[in-house]
Amino acid sequence: MKVFIEKDYDALSDKAFEVMKEVLDENDHPVLGLATGSSPEGLYARMVEDYKEGNHSYKDVVTFNLDEYVGIDRNDPQSYYTFMNDHLFKHIDIDPANTHVPYGSTDEAAKEYDDQIKSVSIQLLGIGRNGHIGFSEPGTPFDERTHIVDLTDSTIEANKRFFDNDVNKVPKQAISQGIATIMDADKILLIASGADKADAVKAMIEGEPTIECPASALQNHKDVVVVLDEAAASKLTR
């Protein structure tokens, strides 16, 4: 696990783009595992800017997203499908047929999505305050694949800011790649910013691998890059 500590969110996003750029440069047909939330917004902005400058085309890129809420329309402003289009897809030359965001509420839908995911060149991750990656919450077995998950109270509370600060409007379930699916990627890039992520970051990097901190499973992956700002790294001791 390589850990980079940057001064602030802008510097973090610059470093994350460096890592993503290497993958785009090294692969003729890269498969990108993508994430939503506030953490990757800066990275996506840099990918869009880089595309507009003519440095990279996405015509031969395939993407698979980590997760999506259950019971939310794809065109809902808070759906992850909408997020990806608003922040990345509609600004680059990617073929919409090559973009994949999970959708559905059944075990069959989860397995169908999992079966599509092949040869991911790099998987982008954020980390939840409770250590979740994707929506694989604490207690998720490390061998779990794409599945339907009941969101924890802490995750619902953290996400209410996107739903008029009303926990009753936040979906209670999600369809999410499991830890085993994430670990299949050739490379993993995790980014985290803010002091509210510091405890989870410490558990991920310095704690023992345990299902109580799903992100700690990344210690067992052969190629992980973690990019933090100083606030998120503030509780690390080594």
Image (spheres, rainbow, N blue to C red):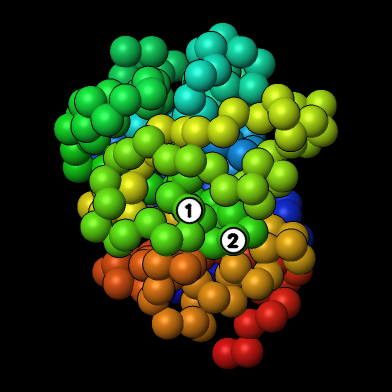
Q: In which quarter of the image is residue 87?
A: top right
Residue behind mark 2: 130
Q: Circle 1: is it few (<14), some (14-19), or many (20+) Cα within 10 Å?
A: many
Q: In this view, does 181 lie to the left or right of 22?
A: left
Q: Distance between the residues labelled 1 and 2?
A: 8 Å
Verify CB contact (< 8 Å) between mark 1 and mark 2: yes
Extreme-bottom residue of the structure: 238
Residue drawn at (64%, 22%) of the image = 78
Residue 111 on image: x %, y %: 22, 32
For the point 48% across and 25% down, which residue is it? Answer: 70
Residue located beneath label 1 in the image: 137
Q: Is mark 1 on a helix, strand or loop?
A: loop
Q: Does any portion of residue 140 appear in the rendered image?
A: yes
Total marks in image: 2
Q: Depth check: 125 or 59 in front?
A: 125
Tell me where residue 108 appears, x and y as whole percent.
23, 25
Q: Earlier in the sequence, mark 1 or mark 2?
A: 2
Quadrant into which the N terminus falls: bottom left
Residue 112 location (% of width, % of height): 21, 26
Q: Is residue 51 visible?
A: no
Of the numbered discs in the image, which one, if any, rests on residue 197?
A: none
For image coordinates 31% across by 25% down, the residue present is: 106
Q: What element carries label 2?
A: loop
Rendered image quadrant of residue 224:
bottom left
Q: Residue at x 40, y 67 (%)?
A: 211
Amino acid at circle 1: Glu
